[in-house]
Amino acid sequence: YFIMRNTAYHLLIGKLQSGKTTKAISKFNKYLQEGECLPIFCTHSSENVFCDLQSKLDPNYTYFDPREGTSKVLFGNRQRTSWAKFLKNIMSYGTVDDGYGIVGLNNRYFHEKIAPAVLNYHHKKIIFVDEYDNSQIGFTTKRQPVQRDRWLYSYEIESVIDEMVLLSATNLAAAISNKTFDPDCIEIIKPGKGYQGWGKSIKRRYLDESDFEALREGRPRGAIFDIAGDAPGHVMVNIETHIDVHNAIADSFRDAGFKTMVVNSESVFDFETL
């Protein structure tokens, strides 16, 4: 049988690093405890964000050794045996035991994998989309041909999702989309005590292109070290996509006496140390 759904939209918005993802994970964990409910979390498509999300999920529902196959939160392609059993139950009976959830990178491969579960699970389904403003959600005209976005759009137009929980710090896309969001479904996340965002205790210094070129080459000029040394907390350098450049920049800061961590798609690190 088929149930027509009117998808509800819930916006989780707030300042950069203000706790939106933590709030969303809290909601996801609650849905895991709800009967006849399948929560799905599409995280921002980078490996380090995915690892951070894993670390924050309810440990009562996660088990990170894929050989055991005991996790009720299924992580994309990492638990093939568990996923096969999960999908077999859905395709055979239209349901699964309570407490199951799905987490993965928001890309077309993830959506191709979860589509049978989304279409054939006939109970409550909640999908969380991190950085939703990169996915053309709410746009019905002037859409770009992006396969990942097409999957999300199909969930919308086919009404197979009960609720979409959308996260972002930059919500211009929602403002200019074709969708009108109910004010009662917009939740503004307030930062915790001690939060310092843009415009609060931030000293702005200006560097020219030669400073950035020197930094990419692993020989930062004194002005950059001065900025890092004067900073009251952590300093993030995000100027380049190539991993070898990340390593060269990190080495230059280590040589200058700074404690340094590289965070990119090849990193193996513990978020507790950040």
Image (cartoon, rainbow, N blue to C red):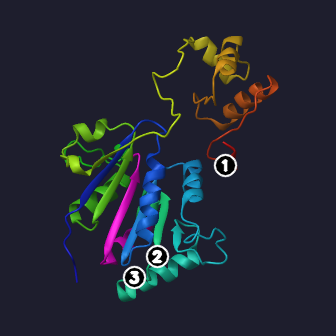
Q: In the structure shown, which secondary structural element does the residue marked by tag 3 occupy?
A: helix
Q: Residue at x 35, y 51 (%)?
A: 166
Q: Which residue is mark 3?
A: 90
Q: Residue at x 29, y 53 (%)?
A: 10
Asked whether the viewer can see residue 195, the reply is: yes
Alpha carbons under labels 1 and 2: distance apart: 26 Å
Badge 3 amino acid: Ile
- Horizontal side of 73 relative to 163 (left or right) equals right
Give the number of the disc on residue 99. 2
The amino acid beneath tag 1 is: Glu
Q: Quadrant of the N terminus?
A: bottom left
**Which mark's residue is nearer the viewer, 3 or 2?**
2
| Label located before the other in sequence (3 or 1) | 3
Task: Please give the range of residues in magenta.
Answer: 113-131
Task: State the mark number for residue 272.
Answer: 1
Residue 165 drawn at (x, y percent): 34, 55
254 left or right of 34?
right
Calculate the distance from the C-alpha at mark 3 to the C-alpha at mark 2. Answer: 14 Å
| Residue beneath the point at 46% across and 76% down | 99
